[in-house]
């Protein structure tokens, strides 16, 4: 990967006060202390990372700075003067901009309308469109102000968010996990932009749990754990392992990954799968071929919005096909079978959305266990549910997968994202499937839990299960997969052994440019590509 | 069909469509902000009875309309407290409001049941009212008919050209995002709900003061529900609301003419009477089948309570 020029530390002038100082910031929610006595200093032109696991209090702290929530205690100084940020509008008037982890864009509005909503006063839309074009050209973030948000790829949406912030001339830019949806090349461009902003004197607070990114981008880092500051470091002088130790308070477990057993039977076969999406903004799948064998993990990489959702729906059975043969599960032509029938063939499924697809938010964990494991675990007798078995199975998932929760009776929505993901993965794995299909298995899960989930998936493979992983995190795919393919614009690339390819190659493929792609590389949905 | 029959049917169609347009456009604003108020029938009934009573006591129909607006807004405020401040379920609160409003209107309207008002003369617009065929039908109408047209144009401008309308649509699509960039979601929703109530009040006033200058229990006759359905089947687009309302009015008038004409047709009159309801819905469903249109125009957060985290 090309390396950015070495970091030049910001030149602090002794006379000027720090841009932002937090003293003793605390935030207490009814059941949890999210922030406790947090101190933080950001100088002009400094890029400071905020590191921490899920639930460490990073997002709460950023919301306090941006005025979305109020602190329970503590003081905040902006350029030497004490302030109480009353609202996001107030924060923006001070010069604080924020790019949210979950985009705060309005899908049915155009780019220029979205930007107008965040600016003070009543800018004329035409003049504003012109300014958007200028700013986006200056920072290498091309966006077309007239397009509707729903028609943009996630990378483009993020550019809109950033441009929206830049138009407010921020002096402090807060970025909450901005790279989770970008290709490696797009991440590189983003970093160049951020470096440029910092050189111009803008301070940046950068939240992430991708340690190598932080080492490359940030001058300084503050580590949070359990709502408290547990350390500060200069990332360039640390290793990812030493920062992970600061973050989780112990050594990061490594995944053990042996060579795959060769010659397993085909458990999942896509035989020329084509499917037109009935969603007007969806992606059509075009002639997909793929075999997943027992005892191997196959990964599918790609920038989201290139057909992953459609593919998952077709494999899981949510979207039945007209024909039987394109999807074959454990040797059965399953194209027209319902999700339940496919599960009975030995398939287990971890969807991307935990709440709503993977689990019913308001139902208990035991009830959620019943939803997918009822038949495989004998929870139904003569049409009657056997709740004690559901509870026992949920209890097993909780114990075996270290799920922190209030027991099998706890509602799914009461769990943190990482813990619920562990429960869902556990529920599927403990059914001893013959084929596991999982999407973004560690999305938004902290490093410790992510490593655990990956190890469980590898162990499952070692027991002879076939695994298909669809993920946007290349590091993850390279860590666990035996073979990797790329999906772009609804087409699937050739499958390569993970050892024979590299993150850079796959990154190029993600924009649709794989050998033999030919005419298919017309308009891939990736960030580098100028849009039509 | 002779020319005078056409003119009188067109006239009656416009009159029958007007209350639906006013109420449905109010509800459209309401729903664009993400709030589903099913209480339209009750708000209309209260608007109608308040307008009738005040017009009867004061002799001034415009004071009556003002009273209708006030009554509609008061009812909407009750809904707002329940659904926006107390975060009650919007569907349940709206249904309760509909039942409560219809019942309360019947109760307070008892003394006025046998009373008649003087008909309010229409306003004739010079010159264009002399146009053949359509002039008399369109330009010799009640002031509130002209108001409904002004409301339509004003709303088009407000929703798609003004910043306030942009904010309103943003709140209806994603209240959490709107809150995150600093808009007062609850206050904006209150204003939208009050506007919806005010328009329902005007619609009710039109019925009891201008359309049939009398008060009778149940005189709103399901128009609040039809207005609600119109908004949905029109995929939240003002022009389609307009088309749907006139379609409903047109079919209603046509079947009344047929029933009143003494034509010996072998068709049950009950089915004829139901014609406007299902004809409107069938046509609007047919034109709104495009998923793209629905996705671009429907307020995503419709009916979902929003609680800003403090």
Image (cartoon, rainbow, N blue to C red):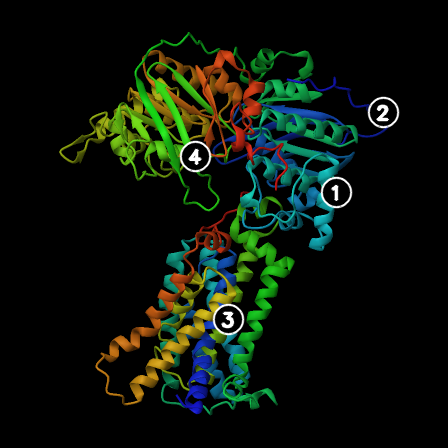
Label 4 vs 2, first from the N-terminus: 2
Find residue A286 and name its label.
4
Residue that protrudes farthest toward the left in the picture: A382
Q: Is residue B98 found left or right of B84 in the rendered image?
A: left
Categorize mark 1 by other alpha carbons within 10 Å: few (<14), some (14-19), many (20+): some
Find residue B199 and name its label.
3
Q: Please say whether residue A407 is visible from this viewpoint.
A: no
Categorize mark 2 by other alpha carbons within 10 Å: few (<14), some (14-19), many (20+): few
In this rendering, which labeled residue sits more in front, label 1 or label 2?
1
Q: Is residue B115 found left or right of A389 in the rendered image?
A: right
Categorize mark 4 by other alpha carbons within 10 Å: few (<14), some (14-19), many (20+): some
Q: CA distance from mark 3 to mark 2?
A: 62 Å
Task: Choose between B210 and B232: the one closer to the eye.
Answer: B232
Q: Which residue is mark 2?
A: A14
In this rendering, which labeled residue sits more in front, label 4 or label 1?
4
Q: CA distance from mark 4 to mark 2?
A: 61 Å
Q: Quadrant of the N terminus of chain B?
A: bottom left
Label 1 vs 2, first from the N-terminus: 2
Badges 4 and 1, same chain: yes
Point out residue A59 in the picture as x, y percentages from the top left corner: 58, 32
Q: Which residue is mark 1?
A: A134
Q: CA distance from mark 1 to mark 2?
A: 35 Å
Task: Choose between A188 and A72: the one closer to the eye.
Answer: A188
Q: In percent of the image, x 39 and y 85: which residue is there?
A: B112
Residue contact between numbered discs 4 and 2, judged by CB atoms under 8 Å: no
């Amino acid at each position: 990967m090309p390396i950015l020029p070495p970091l030049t530390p910001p030149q602090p002038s002794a006379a000027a006060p720090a841009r932002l100082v937090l003293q003793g910031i605390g935030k207490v929610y009814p059941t949890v202390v999210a922030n406790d006595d947090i101190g933080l200093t950001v100088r002009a032109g400094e890029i400071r990372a905020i590191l921490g696991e899920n639930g460490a209090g990073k997002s709460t702290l950023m919301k306090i700075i941006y005025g979305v929530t109020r602190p329970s205690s503590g003081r905040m100084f902006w350029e030497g003067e004490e302030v109480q940020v009353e609202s996001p509008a107030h924060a923006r008037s001070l010069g604080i901009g924020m790019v949210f982890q979950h985009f705060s864009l309005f899908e049915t509005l155009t780019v220029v309308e979205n930007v107008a909503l965040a600016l003070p006063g009543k800018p004329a839309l035409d003049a504003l469109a012109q300014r958007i074009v200028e700013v986006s050209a200056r920072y290498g973030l091309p966006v077309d102000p007239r397009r509707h948000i729903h028609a943009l790829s996630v990378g483009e949406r993020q550019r809109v968010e950033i441009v929206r912030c830049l138009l407010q001339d921020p002096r402090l830019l807060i970025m909450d996990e901005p790279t989770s949806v970008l290709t490696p090349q797009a991440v590189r461009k983003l970093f160049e932009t951020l470096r440029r902003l910092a050189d111009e004197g803008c301070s940046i607070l950068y939240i992430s749990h991708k340690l190598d990114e932080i080492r490359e981008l940030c001058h300084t880092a503050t580590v949070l754990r359990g709502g408290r500051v547990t350390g500060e470091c200069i990332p360039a002088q640390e290793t990812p392992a030493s920062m992970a130790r600061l973050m989780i308070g112990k050594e990061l477990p490594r995944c053990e990954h042996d060579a795959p057993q060769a010659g397993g039977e085909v458990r999942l076969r896509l035989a020329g799968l084509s499917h037109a999406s009935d969603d007007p903004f969806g992606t059509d799948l075009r002639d997909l071929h793929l075999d997943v064998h027992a005892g191997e993990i196959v990964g599918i990489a790609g920038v989201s919005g290139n057909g992953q959702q459609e593919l998952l729906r077709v494999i899981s059975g949510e979207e039945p096909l007209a024909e039987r043969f394109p999807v074959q599960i454990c040797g059965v032509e399953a194209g027209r079978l319902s999700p339940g029938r496919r599960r009975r063939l030995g398939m287990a499924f971890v969807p991307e959305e935990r709440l709503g697809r993977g689990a019913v938010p308001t139902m208990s964990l035991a009830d959620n266990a019943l939803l997918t494991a009822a038949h495989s675990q004998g929870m139904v007798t003569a049409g009657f549910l056997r709740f004690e078995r559901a509870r026992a199975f949920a209890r097993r998932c909780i114990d075996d997968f270290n799920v922190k929760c209030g027991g099998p009776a706890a509602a799914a929505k009461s769990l943190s994202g990482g813990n619920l993901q562990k429960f869902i993965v556990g529920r599927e794995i403990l059914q001893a499937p013959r084929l596991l299909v999982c999407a973004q298995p560690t999305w938004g899960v902290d490093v410790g839990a992510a490593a655990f989930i990956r190890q469980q998936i590898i162990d499952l493979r070692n027991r002879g299960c076939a695994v298909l992983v669809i993920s946007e995190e290349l590091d993850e795919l390279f860590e666990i997969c035996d073979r990797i393919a790329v999906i772009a614009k609804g087409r699937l690339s050739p499958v390569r052994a993970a050892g024979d390819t590299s993150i850079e190659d796959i990154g190029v493929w993600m924009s649709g440019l794989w050998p033999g792609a030919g005419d298919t590389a017309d308009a891939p949905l990736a960030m580098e590509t100028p849009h039509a | 069909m002779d020319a005078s029959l056409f003119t009188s049917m067109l006239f009656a169609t416009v009159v029958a469509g007007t209350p639906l347009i006013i109420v449905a456009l109010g509800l459209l604003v309401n729903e664009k902000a993400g709030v589903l108020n099913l209480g339209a029938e009750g708000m209309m009934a209260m608007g109608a009875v308040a307008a009738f009573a005040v017009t009867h006591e004061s002799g001034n129909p415009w004071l009556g309309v003002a009273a209708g607006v006030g009554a509609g807004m008061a009812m909407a405020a009750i809904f707002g407290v329940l659904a926006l401040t107390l975060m009650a379920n919007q569907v349940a609160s709206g249904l309760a409001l509909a039942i409560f409003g219809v019942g309360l209107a019947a109760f307070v309207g008892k003394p006025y049941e046998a009373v008649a008002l003087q008909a309010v003369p229409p306003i004739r617009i010079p010159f264009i009212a002399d146009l053949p065929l359509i002039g008399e039908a369109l330009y010799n109408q009640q002031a509130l008919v002209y108001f409904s047209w002004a409301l339509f144009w004003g709303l088009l401008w407000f929703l798609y050209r003004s910043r306030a309308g942009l904010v309103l649509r943003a709140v209806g699509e994603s209240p959490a995002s709107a809150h995150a960039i600093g808009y007062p979601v609850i206050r904006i929703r209150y204003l939208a709900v009050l506007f919806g109530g005010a328009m329902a009040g005007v619609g009710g006033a039109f019925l009891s003061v201008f359309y049939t200058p009398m008060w009778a229990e149940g005189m709103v006759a399901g128009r609040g529900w039809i207005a609600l359905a119109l908004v949905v089947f029109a995929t939240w687009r003002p022009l389609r609301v307009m088309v749907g309302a006139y379609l409903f009015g047109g079919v209603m008038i046509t079947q009344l003419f047929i029933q009143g004409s003494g034509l010996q047709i072998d068709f049950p009159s009950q089915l004829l009477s139901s014609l406007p309801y299902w004809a409107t819905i069938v046509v609007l469903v047919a034109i709104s089948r495009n998923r793209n249109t629905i996705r671009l125009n429907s307020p995503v957060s419709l009916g979902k309570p929003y609680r800003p985290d403090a």
